Image: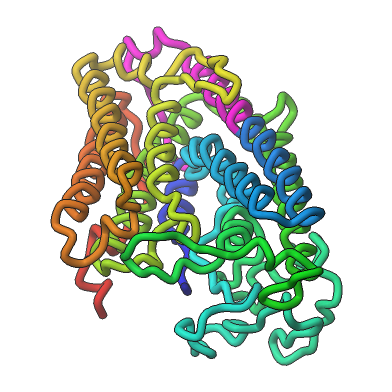
Amino acid sequence: MTRRHGRIATIAATAALTAAIFVLPAKAAEVDPKAVVANYADIALAGYEDSLTTAQALKTAVDALVAKPSQETLDAARAAWKASRIPYQQTEAFRFGNPIVDDWEGRVNAWPLDEGLIDYVDGGYGTESDENTLYTANVIANKSIEINGETVDASKLTPEFLASTLQEAGDIEANVATGYHAIEFLLWGQDLNGTGPGAGNRPYTDYDTANCTGGNCDRRGEYLASASQLLVADLEEMVGNWKADGEARKTLVDADPTEGVSVILTGMGSLSYGELAGERMKLGLLLHDPEEEHDCFSDNTSISHLYDTVGIRNVYRGSYKRVDGSVVEGPSVSDLVKAADPAVDAELSGKLDATVAKMEAIEARAKAGEAYDQQIGEGNTEGNATVQAAIDALVDQTKSIERAVAALKIDAIAFEGSDSLDAPDKVFQ
């Protein structure tokens, strides 16, 4: 894997926001946009706090696996990883439009990754890449590696080494050494089933130093523990950014509140269109390529996509259901749009529900035994149609987000685009 999602449109949108002048319609102004922005920040804080809590549970499960490898401890760590994805994916709507989040996001959710950088891989993976000299560096097996022509000491796989030396080593984005997907690979291993049934199937003995498979079981455990510790630290940082004096919150609440409303809509539209409908879904469907699915080692993609759409709906309606069942809610962009144009609000709210339903249809097929990578497989007419229906719903809801922007008389918002949607012929060049 050699590609990560782009940021050009997001940067353009942010620059445009700083130059624009915003005037909310009179009726919408009856809803306090400052309260809308404050509630959005409260939901962000709650979402990242839940992400942190579940990442801490993941770290505990990982530590148990490393200390006492067994099928039970491996299964528990995998379950904890899957649980951690549900709150985190709902935070992705905060990424676009918030540079603090966007700049940080690559440390925790970058994908796809050239997994040969980290550990052993199947022979079908290949031995070299014209784009990445570290394609099969296998740092777990090698206590020194070469980066940009210089020998680097890799004898200690500490969180600091993973974050400062290995992550995007050689300035290559595919060298993803940290975050959810590096941990996912270490828990599941490669999914060698193509578009057939089955996820990765790494044995627990890859961590058993007494009965080691795969070699270097002690270093594999060290890497996994460090990556899990680093994920917790990164999420602690983002929680801090959304607390009362946090930089992300202050950047929004100290600005003109209509700029904050624009940030919310930018996040909704960019995740909906360019990122999710385009890069994460349409590209894989066009290529029928399981390597292009988001959670490609664990076959958890249907869940991750579903909760991305739930997250978009959360920020529009100003409501988030926490892991403990409590609800954070308050004034919302929906309230603003409803005051300005009730028909547009009803239209967009209905389309957000429709998109979630289409994602639930993908997840229903997955629960019935047909994982997302099978659904995008060539020749799977019904599976392809189910995924395409969700893509179409995302594109359709983006059009309604644009109408909401117009109803609020907000100019200069540019949503992230995708060649997969805008110029699909380029995908095959």
Magenta region, main secondary structure: helix
**Residue sitting at 71 percent across and 28 percent down?**
243
**How many numbered marks have been drawn onto this rendered protein structure?**
0
- Report the residue that reaches farthest toward the front: 211
The residue lying at 48 percent from left, 53 percent from top is: 11
Q: Is residue 386 above or below residue 353?
A: below
Which residue sits at x=76%, y=75%?
A: 216
> Residue 217 lies in magenta, yes or no?
no
Q: Is residue 363 above or below residue 278?
A: above
The location of residue 249, given as percent across then percent down, is 64, 30
In the rendered image, residue 409, in percent from the top left (x then y), is placed at: 31, 27
The quarter of the picture where residue 203 lies is bottom right
Q: Is residue 37 left or right of residue 369?
A: right
Residue lying at the far top of the rendered structure: 30
Q: Which residues are magenta?
A: 18-47
Q: Nearer the viewer, residue 63 or 70?
A: 70
Q: Residue 171, position in %: x, y?
A: 62, 75
Please give the name of the residue rendered at 44% of the width and 27% of the height, measured from the top-left corner: 315
Q: Residue 247, located in which quarter of the rendered image?
A: top right
Q: Is residue 103 visible?
A: no
Residue 88 appears in the figure: yes
Q: Nearer the viewer, residue 292 or 34?
A: 292
